[in-house]
Amino acid sequence: MTDLLYLEDSNVRTFDATVERILEDGRVVLDRTHFYPEGGGQPADTGTLRVDSDGEAFEWPVADVQKRDTVYHVLDLEAGTDSTDGPIADVLEPGTTVTGELDWDRRYAHMRYHTAQHLLSAYLLEAYDAPTTGNQLYADRARLDCAYERFQDDDLATIEAAVNDLIHDGLPVRWYEFERDVAEAELDLERTRIDLLPDSITEIRIVEIGDADDPFDRVACAGTHVQSTADLGTLEITGRETAGSGEERVRFRLLE
Ligand SMILES: [Zn+2]
């Protein structure tokens, strides 16, 4: 399994790695990666993979990243600067050192939106007893589904103001790994939602927002986040709709 470097440090934009495997369709497996694979409502990172081969430079766009048995970087072979006079496997053979570079504007936007989603989820649970049931974020907007009958306009205004207060407080954001059995014994399961994770996961990654002694939010999450809520700017709720029986969908965006 590829070493998921972004779990520890989400601020790295460029990294070196070694090719472990290349498939004919352009999917590449590396020994380590900072590319986030799509999951948990957060889209995959994009960027480039570069390699110097006998003094010649090759570069391909990383169009998608997917996690299955391991992490697959999906290269856009048509758009690459491959000389195309030989198979890609000749350049990216196992053992080759490559340089990965993330599309940082896109990744950083995902980090901001993901952190904002945690704040919104925590506030909706605390103030409305409305647990989050799903979320999808993009680089310019996001939506969150929660179990709640119906938010009125004044509810949305209250929620928006409360989340912006939390943003402007500049709360610290931290993450760390926990053994699953310890986490299940010590943490609030309704909030952390550990019980929703597959049994195969034995190490839980916890993301915390607020004071270390009494965090405002503490949840199991494998996504990428910013380190202070001050980086979120201003949250604007752009709408709501029914997402099913007893389910509300709230749409929001972040202004600088
Ligand atoms: Zn998260």
Image (tube, rainbow, N blue to C red):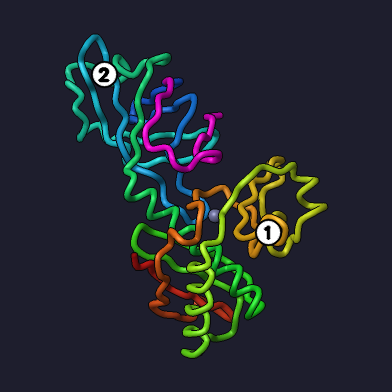
Boundaries of the magenta span: 1-18
Q: Position of residue 237 (x, y in %)?
A: 42, 76
State which quarter of the image contains the C terminus.
Answer: bottom left
Type of amino acid at the residue the image marks with label 1:
Arg
Q: Amino acid at mark 2?
A: Pro
Residue at x 36% of width, y 36% of height: 74
* Residue at the image position 38 percent from the left and 55 percent from the top: 109
Query: Pointer 2: residues within 10 angstroms few (<14), some, or many (20+)?
Result: few
- Residue named by callout 2: 87
Check if residue 10 falls in the magenta segment.
yes
The picture places residue 118, in percent across and down from the top left corner, at: 55, 62
Number of marks in picture: 2
- The dot on residue 46 is none
Q: Position of residue 63 (x, y in %)?
A: 32, 41
Image coords of residue 78 (percent x, y): 21, 33
Report which quarter residue 61 is drawn in. Answer: top left
Q: Secondary structure at mark 1?
A: loop
Q: Who is closer to the viewer here, 117 or 161?
A: 161
Which residue is tagged 1? 193
Q: Is 255 one of the magenta-colored residues?
A: no
Which part of the image, by quadrant, shows the N terminus? top right
